[in-house]
Image: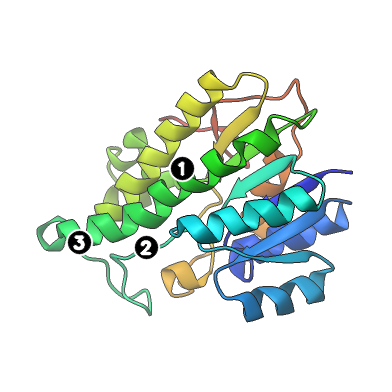
Amino acid sequence: MTTTLITGANKGLGYETARRLTAAGHTVYLGSRDAGRGRRAAEELGARAVQLDITDDASVAAAVEVIEAGGGLDVLINNAGIQAEMTADGSAVSGAADTTADMMRTTFETNVFGTVRVTRALLPLLRRSAAPVVVNVSSGLASLTGVTTPDTPAYAYPGVAYPASKAAVNMLTVQYAKAFPQMRINAVEPGFTRTDLNGRTGIQTVEQGAEIIVRMAQVGPDGPTGGFFDTEGPLPW
């Protein structure tokens, strides 16, 4: 039996990933900052709820205790993230001239430091697994090649904080994969999906967006590691 933790999983891509992996036979811990919402989502899916705020050391430590008591962990999906530079309705994005240190700090606290916090805390459990896997949910906006290619959606995106944070996640992915060669650690690009993250302005469904997350969560010991993928294959850094 494969045991999987998904952060930020009470809605959107995390919820759909939890649904798909539960259906595939995984024991899924559905991580959610809001304990009530997480519990309701877990009950709907037949998953296990765990309260988890990835920006809080005590919350992460408590979640690790729950997961260890439940038997351990095989797959970690770092899905929780924010896009602080985008308005709530997705109608506007703050550009470089309006990017502040506080905006960068807030974004990195969740997208980068939160990913490090959770990954570090769960490394002991993952290292006990026979086939440990980590999936970091990144973005096409993290690709330096993408954002410097004219006449593409990535090139047109004016924000700084979110792409920078996801580029940092990609670097974390590479360095962790090198440090732990017995694990399969990859970053994925779900695509521009309709979720609360972008004010539901995305152009594809959560079912489509979750496809690559679910696929990479199920890679075997001979699968790729240290890579960046979408549904079509490897992406340029």
Look at mark 3 in the image and give the residue it sits on. Answer: 102
The percent coordinates of residue 34 (x first, y second) are 57, 75
On the rendered structure, is 97 left or right of 195? left
- Look at the picture and state if 197 lies above or below 23: below
On the rendered structure, is 27 left or right of 170? right
- Toward the viewer: 55 or 181? 55
Q: CA distance from mark 3 to mark 1?
A: 20 Å
Dot 1 surroundings within 10 Å: few (below 14), some, or many (20 or more)?
Answer: some
Residue type at mark 1?
Val
The percent coordinates of residue 235 (x first, y second) are 49, 33
First reached walking from the N terminus: tag 3 or tag 2: 2
First reached walking from the N terminus: tag 3 or tag 1: 3
Look at mark 2 in the image and give the residue it sits on. Answer: 83
CB within 8 Å, label 3 to label 1: no
Q: Quadrant of residue 6?
A: bottom right
Residue at the image position 47 percent from the left and 55 percent from the top: 57
Look at mark 1 in the image and give the residue it sits on. Answer: 116
User: Which color scheme is applied?
Assistant: rainbow
Residue at the image position 26 percent from the left and 56 percent from the top: 105
